[in-house]
Amino acid sequence: MSFALDVNLLLYASDASSPFHQPARAFLDRLAEGPEIAYLFWPVISGYLRIATHPAVFATPLSPEEAMANMDELLSLPHVQAPGEGERFWPRFREVSKEAGARGNLVPDAHVVALMRENGVRTIWTHDRDYRRFDGVEVRDPFG
């Protein structure tokens, strides 16, 4: 079985002030044990780096070095993959965007869903309900 991770789980795990901090940390600890293939797509990685280091979002933002080290730790696991956009990405992105009526804040989610389809991934772990708007995506919430 394989799955994708959404940025919110990574952010909760890094934000000690979040009520979801401890369950997110526990979830990532279980992920680290494997053996399921976890997809950490580049929009998720860059979103994490952008938000976790932003002083207007985190009461105590991470330094760029801390945020990069967190990504290094995950990406070093043998069962974590970080593929990028391939030849089939643009048609998939257009299809996904049209299906969900993606605009505004839904565009980054459409990007992740298009990457999921391109890589044959159906499941995403997230606390974001917007992913339910996309056909064929199994949304799993580790907090509920």
Image (cartoon, rainbow, N blue to C red):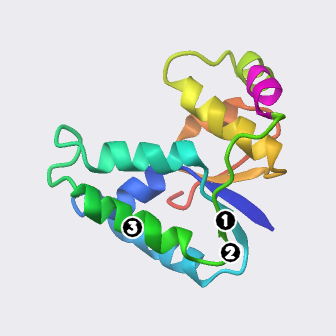
Q: Residues within 10 Å of mark 1 (few under 14, many from 20)?
A: many
Which image quadrant for residue 132? top right
In the picture, the quarter occupied by the C terminus is bottom right
Residue 91 forms part of the magenta stretch: yes
Contact between labelled residues 1 and 3, with CB atoms less than 8 Å apart: no
Tell me the CA gap for discs 2 and 3: 16 Å
Q: Quadrant of residue 16?
A: bottom left
Q: Is 66 covered by the magenta stretch?
A: no
Residue at x-position 65% and y-position 30% = 110
Residue behind mark 3:
70
Which residue range is magenta in the image? 89-94
Residue 38 is tagged as 1
Which residue does the image show at 57% across and 15% down from the upper left?
A: 103
Residue bearing the label numbered 2: 79
Disc 3 is placed on an element classified as helix
Query: Which residue type does callout 3 highlight?
Result: Asn
| Amino acid of disc 1 | Ala
Residue 83 in the image, given as x and y percentages of width and height: 69, 53
Relative to residue 108, is residue 114 drawn left or right? right
Would residue 88 be found to the left or right of residue 115 on screen?
right
Q: Residue at x 43, y 43 (%)?
A: 47
Q: Is residue 62 above or below residue 130?
A: below
State the separation of the CA atoms marked 1 and 2. 6 Å
Q: Residues within 10 Å of mark 2 (few under 14, many from 20)?
A: some
Q: Are marks 1 and 2 in contact (CB under 8 Å)?
A: yes
